[in-house]
Amino acid sequence: MSKILIIEDEAAIRRVLLRILSEENSNYKVSETEDGVQGINLVENENFDLILCDIKMPKMDGIEVLTQIKKIKPEIPVIMISGHGDLDTAVHSMRLGAFDYISKPPDLNRLLNTVRIALDSKQLFVENKRLKKKVQKKYEMIGKSPSITHIKEMIEKVAPSDARVLITGANGSGKELVAHWLHEKSLRNKGPLIEVNCAAIPSELIESELFGHKKGSFTGASKDRAGKFETANNGTLFLDEIGDMSLSAQAKVLRALQESEISRVGSDQNIKVNVRVIAATNKDLQKEISAGNFREDLYHRLAVILIKVPLLNERRQDIPLLIQHFSKKISEEQGTVSKEFSKNAITMLQKYDWTGNIRELRNVIERLIILSGEQVSENDVKLFASK
């Protein structure tokens, strides 16, 4: 059932709109009010999927109503209803966030089509919001240790800028998580976050992966293909394990950062890109530079901001929180009740040597949840958590 609110001071127009919408779809539940003040009260106290609002009204005009609605519930699409003399105001309302405007008297087909599209957009907005929350929950940063608190503070400061960030740390320590939060809290968060694992792509294919290629530029290039830089336009490109990138690809990445443009493999045409680059590595890039494996000029381009993710062994005080988090998450995934860990079991896990960091801890927690009884005991840890 889609709930629609009509805010219109002319009774005749309200009756027309009410009749059209009610006859169009039995799943439309239509409410009405004659002034903007009452309309705002209804929006505050009820959940509507769409609002049709007149522009010229006593007490509070439509522009004021629109502005208030966008502050209270920005997800609700608002269609403005305008007289012929109100078109300039109607256009202004679009700039303020109105979904569309309909002229009086309303054209039946245009009205119904606009209503359907607006309701679809509301559903899409809600679904995107739900998916975004799901992603945020997936990449939740767990911990209160000084090192994790410092990283959270760094993210808050750095994310809103376009500064490039180099994230360092061992495998499994959470570098990807930091990259996701940098994007999520950035001004680019409505754009894409494109991830490239440089270690997982053969050196002969990395340039095509990053910059795209023209048809026929190499064996297997059967059609033109956009690369990750183009795909990430107006968003963030996360180059994971950049220490494994070939020197040839490094040179092209450096040029892309310097010029804000790329060219596809097999093409001499330059393509402008607007991309924020975040890189990560488990290697000591200073040593790689000395060994001739990594370009020093690229390092300085990437490492405007350095964030070092600590080993799990360096933040043992976070292990109880991580155990609780993973226990709940894994139980939800498996459709079972979350298991409690005894104090002794937690203490034992805090003393382990976590060479695989958080990734290893999660695997151990999953194993313990599957193999232990109602409560994970110290003996369960001895039996099932050993390496």
Image (cartoon, grey):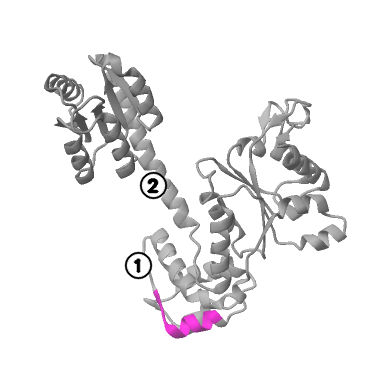
Question: Which residue shows up at 35% across the image and 30% down it?
Answer: 98
Residue topped by disc 1: 337
The reply to whether the magenta stretch includes residue 137 is no
Q: Is residue 298 left or right of 349 when viewed as pictured? A: right
Answer with the quarter of the image where residue 227 lies.
top right
Residue topped by disc 2: 130
- Label 1–label 2 contact, CB within 8 A: no
Question: Which residue shows up at 20% across the image and 30% down it?
Answer: 7
User: What residue span does the magenta drawing correspond to?
Assistant: 340-350
What amino acid is at disc 2? Arg
Q: Residues within 10 Å of mark 2 (few under 14, many from 20)?
A: few
- Mark 2 lies on a secondary structure that is helix
Question: Which residue shows up at 44% across the image and 67% down it?
Answer: 325
Q: Is residue 87 visible?
A: yes
Q: Report, in whole angstroms, how far the alpha carbon at label 1 lies from the one at label 2.
A: 24 Å
- Mark 1 lies on a secondary structure that is loop
Question: Which residue shows up at 26% across the image and 17% down it?
Answer: 83
Q: Is residue 110 visible?
A: no
Precedes in sequence: disc 1 or disc 2: 2
The reply to whether the magenta stretch includes residue 341 is yes
Foreground residue among 201 and 109: 109
Principal SS element in the magenta part?
helix
**Where in the figure is residue 42, as x and y percent of width and height?**
18, 40
